[in-house]
Image (cartoon, rainbow, N blue to C red):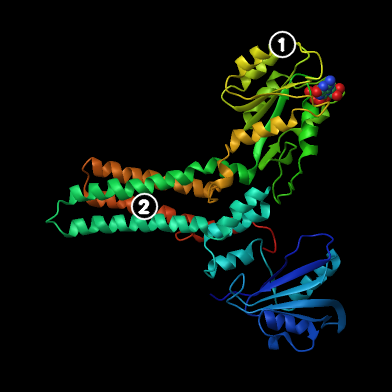
């Protein structure tokens, strides 16, 4: 395909040792050559070389920057197009000036994600891989990064392709059965669907079962801390934040009204909600009443309930326990450095299958056990060993769910003795839905929408 030449700053904004301005498109080299002075013009440089020189502002004939310029000729590039990467000094003004120069000399400012979009449109990667790139940029933990990396490498796409192949073969079989009436078409169709259809359905199901963990890895597990005043909520928050590497939360374009903090607890990215609320109430009369807690519990995927071991269980404590029924929750019995006044057996009884951990946040004890409980609740040990093709993207989840439904319908239709071509329609539909995951069957506006979520320069 033939596109115009785009440019953007590809390194993060702000101070850094170097900054990179990236160009992609047929005019990348001619545009760069209008500005570049080195031993020879870039047009004469071999591909995949880096070239030392200076950038000259042609309007005023003045040296602007000392640069290293990478010459990358298509198709062996990120976008499959000719690309140029200008490495310059890292300050904002200098990178911006270089960008401005290439824009003044024929390049167009890239939209967010446009480089990756071109890689997709030029057929270098499929849509699930492109989405993997986006996840990679925003990955909050190393694990999330591995998952995204796998997607970028096309692991998910491979599995989807295999499934589609199976479905095609099923359709082909059904087709043959129609064409050879000496067979009992209905009977044969049923047979094929029971085996092949059943296998596909099982495999889609297996993928969908990874979605819960995949989604947590990708988006973080929204976590709330509740408890009566003075039991140690703020201490818990501080302990979680200080013990664990805080995660970069800066996702462009998202504004939320709850203040939140990200921490990485043994590979589980926690998104701690309402952290301001917990801190704000310090030294004031605490206002986290039951109503407020109820609302918080509704927003949290994980609820940490704190009670004080130094006091008998109150009616309010029990009310808070009740609120968390049916939620993933961990009960934290804090202040176990003080005299034991709580009925722990009773707490465990109320907790049922929710883990109970005793801590002294003051003396920093029990936090390891708590972290282990959090990890155990979400990754029962299988995360490390399993293959990493998690489905984490809600678009994929929706498509897979619909595809599974279509296969189901085909199988039911066959069992009920519906005409064979009806069965075929459902199988074809499943095949199409799976195609959308990898971008085989998507319309242009969806593509625009997806790529618009990217960062600039990617
Ligand atoms: P919150 O009101 O639930 O947020 O509770 P805070 O975290 O503000 O703690 C209330 C008080 O209890 C503070 O003075 C803390 O230092 C103290 N505290 C917190 N955890 C412990 C603990 O494990 N042992 C003891 N002895 N005091 C604690
Ligand atoms: Zn507090």
Disc 1: residue Cβ within 8 A of ligand 1's nearest atom: no
Helix, strand or loop at label 2? It is: helix
Task: Indicate whether 59 appears above or below 15.
Answer: below
Residue 332 relative to residue 328: left or right: right
Residue at image point 28% right, 45% down: 194
Residue 173 relative to residue 389: left or right: left
Q: Residues within 10 Å of mark 1 (few under 14, many from 20)?
A: few
Residue 398 relative to residue 376: left or right: left
Ligand 1, image quadrant it occupies: top right
- The residue nearer to you, when weighing 385 against 3, is 385
**Residue 406: assigned label:** none
Residue at image point 70% right, 75% down: 107
Residue 7: quadrant of the picture: bottom right
Q: Position of residue 322 (x, y in %)?
A: 61, 18
Residue 163: quadrant of the picture: bottom left
- The residue nearer to you, when weighing 39 against 199, is 199
Q: Position of residue 175 (x, y in %)?
A: 24, 58
Q: Is residue 149 visible?
A: yes
**N-terminal-most mark, 1 or 2:** 1
- The residue nearer to you, when weighing 346 against 200, is 346
Task: Indicate whether 353 appears above or below 161.
Answer: above
> How many marks on residues?
2
Task: Indicate whether 138 appears above or below 7.
Answer: above
**Residue 429: assigned label:** 2
Residue 120 relative to residue 235: left or right: left
Q: Is residue 453 visible?
A: no
Helix, strand or loop at label 1? It is: loop
Q: Position of residue 87 (x, y in %)?
A: 78, 72
**Residue 314: assigned label:** 1
């Amino acid at each position: 395909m033939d596109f115009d030449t785009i440019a953007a700053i590809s390194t993060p904004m702000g101070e850094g040792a170097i900054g990179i301005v990236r160009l992609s498109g047929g005019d990348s080299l001619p545009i760069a050559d209008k500005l570049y002075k080195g031993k020879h013009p870039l047009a004469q440089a071999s591909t995949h070389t880096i070239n030392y020189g200076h950038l000259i502002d042609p309007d005023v004939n003045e040296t602007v920057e000392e640069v290293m310029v990478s010459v990358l000729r298509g198709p062996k590039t990120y976008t499959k197009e000719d690309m140029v990467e200008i490495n310059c000094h890292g300050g904002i003004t200098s990178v911006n000036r270089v960008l401005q120069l290439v824009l003044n000399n024929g390049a167009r400012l890239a939209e967010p994600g446009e480089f990756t979009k071109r890689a997709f449109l030029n057929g270098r990667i499929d849509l699930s891989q492109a989405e993997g790139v986006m996840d990679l940029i925003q990955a909050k933990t190393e694990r999330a990064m591995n998952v995204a990396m796998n997607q970028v490498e096309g692991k998910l796409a491979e599995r989807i392709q295999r499934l589609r192949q199976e479905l095609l073969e099923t359709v082909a079989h059904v087709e043959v059965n129609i064409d050879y009436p000496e067979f009992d078409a209905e009977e044969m169709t049923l047979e094929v669907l029971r085996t092949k259809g059943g296998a596909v359905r099982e495999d889609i199901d297996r993928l969908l079962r990874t979605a819960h963990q995949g989604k947590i890895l990708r988006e973080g597990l929204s976590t709330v801390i509740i408890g009566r005043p003075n039991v140690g909520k703020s201490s818990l928050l501080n302990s979680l934040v200080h013990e664990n590497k805080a995660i970069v939360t800066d996702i462009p374009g998202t504004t939320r009204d709850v203040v939140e903090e990200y921490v990485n607890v043994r590979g589980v990215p926690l998104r701690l909600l309402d952290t301001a609320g917990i801190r704000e109430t310090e030294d004031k009369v605490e206002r986290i009443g039951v109503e407020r807690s109820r609302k918080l519990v509704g927003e949290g995927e994980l609820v940490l309930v704190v009670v004080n071991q130094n006091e008998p269980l109150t009616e309010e404590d029990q009310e808070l326990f009740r609120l968390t029924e049916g939620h993933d929750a961990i009960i934290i019995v804090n202040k176990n450095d003080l005299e034991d006044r709580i009925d722990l057996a009773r707490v465990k009884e109320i907790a049922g299958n929710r883990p109970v951990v005793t801590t002294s946040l003051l003396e920093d004890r029990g936090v390891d056990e708590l972290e282990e409980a959090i990890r155990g609740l979400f990754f029962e040990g299988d995360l490390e060993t399993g293959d990493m093709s998690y489905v984490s993207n809600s678009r994929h989840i929706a498509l897979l769910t619909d595809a599974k439904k279509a296969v189901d319908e085909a199988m039911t239709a066959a069992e009920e003795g519906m005409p064979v071509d009806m069965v075929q329609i459902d199988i074809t539909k499943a095949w199409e839905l799976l195609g959308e995951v990898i971008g085989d069957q998507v319309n242009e506006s969806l593509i625009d929408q997806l790529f618009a979520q990217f960062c600039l320069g990617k």
